[in-house]
Image (tube, rainbow, N blue to C red):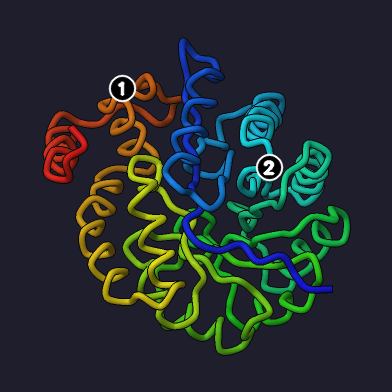
Amino acid sequence: MAKRVFQGSIVALVTPFRDGKVDEAALKALVEFQIAGGTDGIVPCGTTGESPTLDHDEHKHVIDVVIQTVNKRVPVIAGTGSNSTAEAISLTKHAKRAGADGALIVLPYYNKPTQKGLIEHCRAIADAAELPLVLYNIPGRTGVNMLPETVAQLADHLNIVGMKEATGNLEQMTQDIVLCGDKLSFLSGDDTLTLPLMSVGGRGIISVVANIVPKDVSAMTRAFLGGDWKRARELHLKLFPLSQAMFYETNPIPVKTSLAMMGKIREEFRLPLCSMTDANRKRLEAALKSYGLL
């Protein structure tokens, strides 16, 4: 049985709030904006979706709303990872029942498992969930790095189909691909490294900047996958300064601020995330104006 392949521009969707609650109307509008822009897939409740401050009911509700709004037009890969294996299994089973096409499993944060612990954690979810899983390696947030040799041990599991790589280390990403070949679909976790990763065999991006420019991120990945490397490079270089601007402060602060400036959501976060400093807000506004978004 062939594994599901996720590729192209997959947006890590923000979660809009209004008066402290999930803004369902704005969430549905963001989904429509993404699909109209040619996005190849949607990830609700990832880091960009402020999953750490969603309670379990909200987490499940956001996933439900996105799946229902998408209505099978593109794949939905629900963020269901946790530093508790049992909790990750529970959230992933909910995503399966809700109709998700896959699940994004961030590696356990804070408790810093060993490589053996990472293998057992991921296998336990994959065995229990019966849903295509994309593992998410982001040591800058989790405090633990899944090594290429560990990835290779998980690549044979039928339900583990991909990895979002956000180490920022192209050498490690390349080693992942050398060891795993076509067993996994490797997706960049950094917008500034999408094209470099695709050049060594990556299949696309789980993107922050696609929240505001879905058409260009989609066009860039499709150009590369279609063999038009010159066009892909042009779009990558065009996107590069805007992608950098999304990290003037901790993600998703700049991207939500951008969407608010564009009139798509309210500028609202949950503590400990907060509004941007005035200096960074001015830099962000300049970047959006330079791109033609304001």
Q: Residue 226: percent from the left, percent from the top?
A: 44, 73
Q: Nearer the viewer, mark 2 or mark 1?
A: 2
Check the picture and name the quadrant holding the N terminus: bottom right
The residue positioned 71% from the left and 65% from the top of the image is: 4
User: What's the amino acid at mark 2?
Assistant: Lys
Where 125 sits versus 74, above or below? below
Q: CA distance from mark 2 to mark 1?
A: 27 Å
**Tag shown at residue 127:** none
**Tag shown at residue 72:** 2
Where 23 sits versus 40, above or below? above
Q: Quadrant of residue 134?
A: bottom right
User: What's the amino acid at mark 1?
Assistant: Gly
Q: Residue 73: percent from the left, percent from the top?
A: 62, 43
* Observer-nearest of 159 and 204: 204
Where 49 sits versus 165, above or below? above
Considering the numbered disc 2 on the image, is that residue within a helix, a strand or a loop?
Answer: loop
Badge 1: how crowded within 10 Å, few (<14), some, or many (20+)? few
Q: Which residue does the numbered mark 1 point to in the structure image?
A: 263
The residue positioned 15% from the left and 29% from the top of the image is: 278
Counting residues from the start of the chain, the first of labels 2 and 1 encountered is: 2
Of all residues, the one furthest to the top in this rendering is 19
Give the total number of marks visible in the rendering. 2
* Observer-nearest of 22 and 140: 22
Badge 2: how crowded within 10 Å, few (<14), some, or many (20+)? few
Check the picture and name the quadrant holding the C terminus: top left
Q: Is residue 125 left or right of residue 250?
A: right
